Image (cartoon, rainbow, N blue to C red):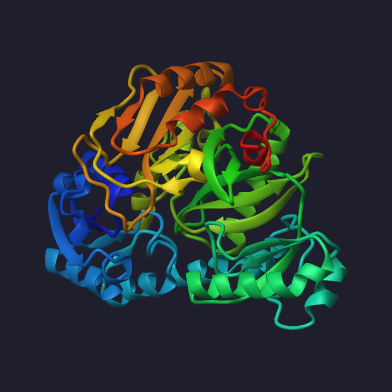
Amino acid sequence: MFKKILIANRGEIAIRVMRTLKEMGIKSVAVYSEADRSCLHVREADEAVCIGPAIAKESYLNISAIISAAKVTGSEAIHPGYGFLSENPVFSAACAENGIVFIGPSPKAIEMLGHKSSARKIAVKGGIPVTPGTRDCVTKDFLKEAEQIGFPIMIKAAAGGGGKGIRIVREKGQLDHEFHMASSEARSAFNNGDVYFEKYIENPRHVEVQFARDSKGAAVAFPERDCSIQRRHQKLVEESPSPAVSQKLRAKLEEAAISLADTADYVGVGTVEFLMDREKNFYFMEVNTRLQVEHPVTETITRTDLVREQILIAAGEKLSLSRARASAFDGHAIEYRINAEDFSKNFAPSVGRIEEWIAPGGPGIRLDTHMYQGYKLPIYYDSMLAKLIVWGSDRAAAIARSRRALSEFKVSGISTTINLHKMIVESPEFQAGTVDTGFMERLLK
């Protein structure tokens, strides 16, 4: 087993990984930018190395600086967290070239599954339903390709994620403009302007399945997460299990995720995302070759440490749980992303010093965060302050506990989305468990 692991990330996820390392008796190394000297992950680590200026491309996206930090500290492995370099095959390859274990899948798997067009082909090969769409990236005959699918269509960045490079086209007169807009945004965000077309499913549910597969070929899948509450393709609330999924359908989703992992010869922890229509037909959407922001809801209902499983797999060990154990769950969990945004002003980012930070607690409450009173938010990074994860014996109990926890959560000095989550919890549609990806648009009308 590893003795020292460097965490190539910051804030909340860096602290989350450190907690597992401490329990496993593994030393942690933090990296930080000049803007993050006072960040909590720097204080909590066994060692910390400054890797550059505040701008991410000169620090958290600087592969050579991170590799150098790992070498200087004698780190045997690197955990990438999520975001930044976590799905970068060049980074994964650089680790291998320098004799450092990348805690994640191989560069080949990241490249194959990270490019959405090639991931669709793997899904088809694995017998997983996919939405009607182009077989490859679209470079010409835009209208012909779109008409073969049938409007409305969705233009999607092949190399992307996080809602970047996505456009919905309802009629052919919009196609040329939206194609070039999507391609331009994809090129800017991912340095790759490739796009492909899919049939647009009106207001589907967004469900995803966490899976893990070791180097011996053993694979498990966990109960699905419902991530339908989104704004501009950015998730706001996630829960597990989905109120729309039966046990029979859950088994099919888990089988699909394992089939994809086996077909891709994937080694590590990942997530398969699906769209589900009103008739409960599900379609492959994409694979995330890293730990998800919303992984705590799965951990909470299955009593599993997914970071630990990642580390075991990377060390060449077997999964610590069986398929039956992975798919078993207890109760219901909901995660609320608390962001530094003013939702009353079109979700404008909020920066400043945290004057007050009173976190909720008590039974069934987990808070993953790097915030503390007096902390000054840097302007350079993601707006997420915390993830509030609430567990209840069933969904109704989890909602009741959510109401209590959100009322306890007090933050001043900056604007947050706490009050937005209070609105969501009180929504009859949310309480009934009938939300879809159009929910936020209806809520904020």
User: Image check: 427 left or right of 12?
Assistant: right
Looking at the picture, tell me which residue is in the foreground, 88 or 326: 88
Is the residue 390 above or below the residue 274 in the image? above
Quadrant in the rendering for residue 155: bottom right
Decide if residue 49 is in sight here.
Answer: yes
Point out residue 322 in the picture as x, y percentages from the top left corner: 50, 39
Decide if residue 334 is in sight here.
Answer: no
Looking at the picture, tell me which residue is in the foreground, 75 or 420: 420
User: Image check: 10 left or right of 52?
Assistant: right
Q: Quadrant of the C terminus?
A: top right
User: Image check: 207 left or right of 6?
Assistant: right
Quadrant in the rendering for residue 159: bottom right
**Farthest-out residue, front:** 345
- Residue at horizontal 30 percent and vertical 26 percent from the top: 359
Looking at the picture, tell me which residue is in the foreground, 393 or 41: 41
- Residue at horizontal 63 percent and vertical 71 percent from the top: 181
**Farthest-out residue, bottom:** 140
Point out residue 223 in the picture as x, y percentages from the top left corner: 57, 37
- Residue at horizontal 65 percent and vertical 46 percent from the top: 255
Quadrant in the rendering for residue 47: bottom left
Total count of labels: 0
Is the residue 161 above or below the residue 433 in the image? below
Point out residue 268 in the picture as x, y percentages from the top left corner: 45, 56
Point out residue 350 in the picture as x, y percentages from the top left corner: 37, 46
